[in-house]
Image (cartoon, coloured by chain):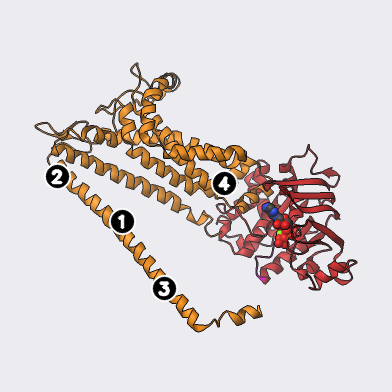
Amino acid sequence: MAKRIDVSGLTAYYSAHKAIEDISMTVEPRSVTAFIGPSGCGKSTLLRTLNRMHEVTPGGRVEGKVLLDDENLYSSSVDPVTVRRTVGMVFQRPNPFPTMSIFDNVAAGLRLNGRYKKSELNDVVEKSLKGANLWNEVKDRLNKPGSGLSGGQQQRLCIARAIAVEPQVLLMDEPCSALDPISTLAIEDLIGELKERFTIVIVTHNMQQAARVSDRTAFFNLSAVGQPGRLIELDETSRIFSNPSVQATEDYISGRFG
Amino acid sequence: MAISTETSPAPPAPRKRVKQSTGRAGDKVFLGLSRGSGILLLVLMASIAAFLTYRSVLAISKDDTNFLTTFNWDPAAAKPTFGIAVLLFGTVVSSVIAMAIAVPVAVGIALFISHYAPRRLAAPLAYVVDLLAAVPSIIYGIWGALFLVPYLEGTNLWLDQYLGWTYIFDKTEVGVARSIFTVGVLLAIMILPIITSVSREVFLQVPRINEEAALALGATRWEVIRLSVLPFGRSGVISASMLGLGRALGETMAVATVLSPSFLISGHVLDAGGGTFAQNIAAKFDEANPLGRDALIASGLVLFILTLLVNGAARMIIARRKEYSGANA
Ligand SMILES: Nc1ncnc2c1ncn2[C@@H]1O[C@H](COP(=O)(O)OP(=O)(O)OP(=O)(O)O)[C@@H](O)[C@H]1O
Ligand SMILES: [Mg+2]
């Protein structure tokens, strides 16, 4: 179920602006890979190329390959809609469907995929909410709107929604940046549990978070503002934080940056 | 952190005071203005209602028959009789037909412009729609009388043939139909641009993050619309429809040009005859005697109340699911 991601020679543009250039890397299945780097270096852009969300942005364009196991996501025969059903995404700001109940939010992805019996939906919704550590807090109000939850609960609801369709990969773009420390901790614990089943990529600005949750860390940088971002190094998280092989990584991590 | 806590509570004292006082003066002016215009609006509404009611009572007290159920309009007769039954029926039915046609089409066009059309096409289309929304209704009226009425003949026959069994679409007479149905179609065309234009604006306001939520789940374009765009735009579309309905209820000249009025209520909407409040007022006001004018004003009061009721109902629909509106998202 969890799949390996192989990125090779990936360059992404916003119209004429080249945001990331020539990125090649491998993301191991059933592991957490963290993307770190200064603002504007293209972490979100790269993340969004992994489920073909980048091309949704007007002017968004991609060159290069992204292999999910052995299938190139960018080959002409692949439907981006199918890709997004396989590669789930959690956004920086919690974005439950505001008009839908908690139950319907979690069931939304399943309902897109086909017809399910009510009992099947019940099971999946319960399992996903439990998987997102939200079940106990919402089990008595599944029919209340998702937008009535706290920010941290909403973010866990979004995670439940994403995992309900059993994706192979889960992409998270700064999932805790809008949350308080306790909610953050809850989500970090959750990521630790989810990696048993999914391949997880997480973008974070929080070094401690990267160190806490990830197995491998990729550091990105850009030579100057307006220049495309590049992958500087990707290694075991423990190595990146103790003994990185590139000076720029060490400077960034120890805060001696720019 | 440390820097901000140090600087923010201790700005130079005099400057702070100056800044506050101008802020307060601005607030006061604004408060006065907004309160004043609010009161003015209420007073205006109340005096319109009072005027209409006063003149209506004058008229109705001189008429022995029931104002609400009489199928006749003859306030100049020795024994004046008039009633709004036909007008109410015609107004409601033509507006329902207009809304039933215009709202789905308008939402479709608005979605096409906002979410389907390539950008190069969307901009000029949006411009054209906004332009059409600004065209005075008399232009549509003339167009309707000259082109729509003859061309609707075929549509009427078709409806009669296939939907005649519904009674509503049973056409019992031959010839060009200057009917309530024709009025409804014409009204639909007239209110289409305004509903489209406002709906398009609303659909463009859907936050990107809401649409991306659906996209990231693997939603197709239509599914994004169903999951994110329509729920978000719902109250806006209702408001847009109310704008359109307001125009339809009050439309005068266009209706007067295409309808051949009569004081009959017929469930056969394809047959000629019937009337609407606005059309009846426009047609009769000039030659009416003082009692006739008061009678027309009484019918205007009913239109006024009808409009208030419809708007109230729309507000209730919007408010009923407010907790789901996303305002607290
Ligand atoms: N919608 C867009 N249109 C045009 N340029 C964009 C757009 N989004 C991002 N960019 C540009 O692409 C580059 C990479 O942006 P990206 O958002 O991927 O950076 P990031 O590493 O995620 O930054 P942050 O840490 O602040 O989130 C930046 O130069 C940015 O200005
Ligand atoms: Mg980002």
As drawn, the residue found furthest toward the left would be B78
Q: Amino acid at mark 3?
A: Arg
Q: Can marks 2 and 4 be said to lie on one chain? A: yes
CA gap, disc 1 and disc 2 = 26 Å
Asked if residue B54 is positioned above or below residue B171 in the image, the reply reads: below
First-in-chain label (4 vs 1): 1
Q: Residues within 10 Å of mark 4 (few under 14, many from 20)?
A: many
Instruction: Read off the residue under disc 1.
Output: B41
Q: Amino acid at mark 1?
A: Leu
Query: Where residue B229 is drawn, which disc sits there?
Result: 4
Q: Which residues are magenta?
A: A174-180
Chain ID, mark 3: B
Query: Where residue B24 is drawn, which disc sits there?
Result: 3
Which image quadrant for residue A185?
bottom right
Q: Can marks 4 and 3 be said to lie on one chain? A: yes
Mark 2: secondary structure: helix
Please state the quadrant of the image where ligand 1 appears: bottom right
Across and down, in percent, residue A147 comes to 57, 58
CA gap, disc 4 and disc 1 = 34 Å
Q: Can marks 2 and 3 be said to lie on one chain? A: yes
CA gap, disc 2 and disc 3 = 50 Å
First-in-chain label (2 vs 3): 3
Instruction: Read off the residue under disc 2.
Output: B58
